[in-house]
Image (cartoon, helix red, strand yellow):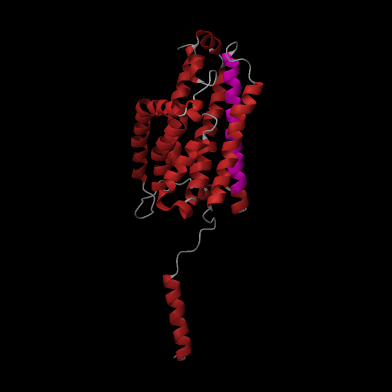
Amino acid sequence: MLPVKDTVAAAESTFVTSTAPPAADPWQQYSLGKILGIWALAAIPMGLLGWVVFPTLSPDSYSDPLGAGVMRTVLITTGLIWQFVLCMIIVAREAGDLRWATIKRRLRLNPPRDPTTGEPRARLWLWAIALVIGFAAWEIAVAPNLSRLWVSIAPFFAEPSGYSLASLFQSPDVMARLVGAWWFFGLFLILAVFNSILGEELLFRGLLLPRMEGVFGRWSWLANGVLFGCYHVHQPWTILSNAIGDSLFLAFPSWRFRSTWMGVIVHCLQNVFFMFLILGVVLGLA
């Protein structure tokens, strides 16, 4: 039989072990300063590329709208690639390596998990279908109206002439020049990959979102969406619609189901649409 002192010590040890919180996550929650710092490292370069570098380097948008559009696409893609590099730098510094297993865990690249049990559930992927449909309806019926409202409140955020990539497809001359231009299709694919997968989603939903709960609690998804909307300083006419829509359709499902893939799938919707549009133009079908 153990002495009374040892028995009490053993009992205390058992009690402490059973009531102690789970082992701390090796990647601790971020402070507000760190969250805003990472946001700034993503937003400021995009702003400089969009409002300083582009006007300096681009050809006149009236004389050569295609050249201006290509230049802006290249610059925005460069900013998105920087976000991927930034994400990998932070993961390497925090985790000590960039093994695929580490990246998957740190950036929550796992199947969606049941919000109650925390267990992965294959049927939860069906939510992605509903979210994609909802996001498409939002982009068609709601987002344009919000952008117009936003610009009416803050006219200085209006989109300048020559900044719209969509306007390229309204010019018969540009459309004719793009027939057979597979280089343009390839450029868009690079932009799309870093826009909806390797750049914005990895940084905002993979890196930041899981580490914002320490500051914002259960509303971390909303804070993440608002930060993401404000990150669009390179196209400020979309800030309001992005802040609301991306909170609901990108940040919330990624937070709710503890999976970055949910945001990635929904975010890919826009790029898939433009991919088929550009493909049709390059093939001369448009």
Question: Left or right: where does residue 227 sit relative to residue 116?
Answer: right
273 to 215, vertically: above or below? above
In this orientation, which residue lies closer to the viewer: 47 or 18? Answer: 47
Rendered-image quadrant of the N terminus: bottom left
The total number of labels drawn is 0
At which x and y percent is residue 227? 49, 41
Whether residue 175 is visible, yes or no, is yes
Q: Main secondary structure of the magenta part?
A: helix
Residue occupying image coordinates x 48% and y 50%? 212
Magenta extent: 65-90
Residue occupying image coordinates x 46% and y 40%? 226
At which x and y percent is residue 142? 36, 29
Asked if the magenta segment contains residue 38, the reply would be: no
Residue occupying image coordinates x 55% and y 42%? 39
Whether residue 257 is visible, yes or no, is no
Dividing the picture into quadrants, the one containing residue 180 is: top right
Residue occupying image coordinates x 59% and y 28%? 50
Question: Left or right: where does residue 200 sit relative to residue 142?
Answer: right
At which x and y percent is residue 79? 60, 33
In this orientation, which residue lies closer to the viewer: 125 or 212? Answer: 212
16 to 101, vertically: above or below? below
Rendered-image quadrant of the C terminus: top left
10 to 119, vertically: above or below? below
At which x and y percent is residue 11? 43, 81
Q: In the image as oriented, which residue stretches furthest toward the right?
A: 57
